[in-house]
Amino acid sequence: MSSRFLTLADVTELLNISAAQAYSLVRSGELPAIQIGGRNQWRIERTELEGYIERMYAETRRRIEAGVIQDSAPAKDDTSPA
């Protein structure tokens, strides 16, 4: 059974981002999360992460359609032809 909540470490792994980037997404409210426990550990509901991903797809589509998408250098592991 899959857990309902993810840790920040889970999010960093799933999105392939740094811990600082994941923390920033949560602290800004861009990625909704809750703090639980005595140490106020962040937890992200799996459905919230999926919603965030869908919003980012939609935002990217809008930017492409508007012609304002910024191209970046391909990742080192990108094997697609140039």
Image (spheres, rainbow, N blue to C red):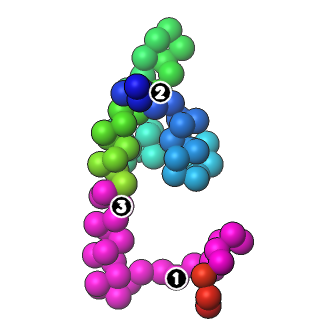
Horizontally, is 24 left or right of 46 in the view? right
Query: Does 6 sit above or below residue 35?
Result: below
Residue visible at 51% across and 41% down in the picture? 11
* Furthest residue in direction right, as rendered: 76
Horizontally, is 71 left or right of 18 in the view? left
Is disc 3 in contact with disc 2, using a CB cutoff of under 8 Å?
no
Amino acid type of disc 3? Met
CA gap, disc 1 to disc 2? Answer: 32 Å
CA gap, disc 1 to disc 3? Answer: 16 Å
Amino acid type of disc 2? Trp
Quadrant where the image shows the C terminus: bottom right
Residue holding disc 3: 56
| Part of the protein shown in magenta | 54-79
Dot 1, how many residues are within 10 Å of its Cα: few (below 14), some (14-19), or many (20+)? few
Whole-percent x, y for residue 33 in the image? 38, 33
> Toward which corner of the image does residue 79 lie, by quadrant?
bottom right
Dot 3, how many residues are within 10 Å of its Cα: few (below 14), some (14-19), or many (20+)? few
On residue 71, the disc is 1
Query: Does 80 sit above or below residue 14?
Result: below
Amino acid type of disc 1? Asp
Secondary structure found at label 1: loop
CA gap, disc 3 to disc 2? Answer: 21 Å
On residue 42, the disc is 2
Residue visible at 40% across and 25% down in the picture? 1
Residue visible at 71% across and 71% down in the picture? 76
Magenta stretch holds residue 7: no
Secondary structure found at label 2: strand
- In depth, the one of 72 and 80 nearer the eye is 80
Residue visible at 40% across and 33% down in the picture? 44
- In depth, the one of 80 and 27 nearer the eye is 80
Whole-percent x, y for residue 43 in the image? 44, 28
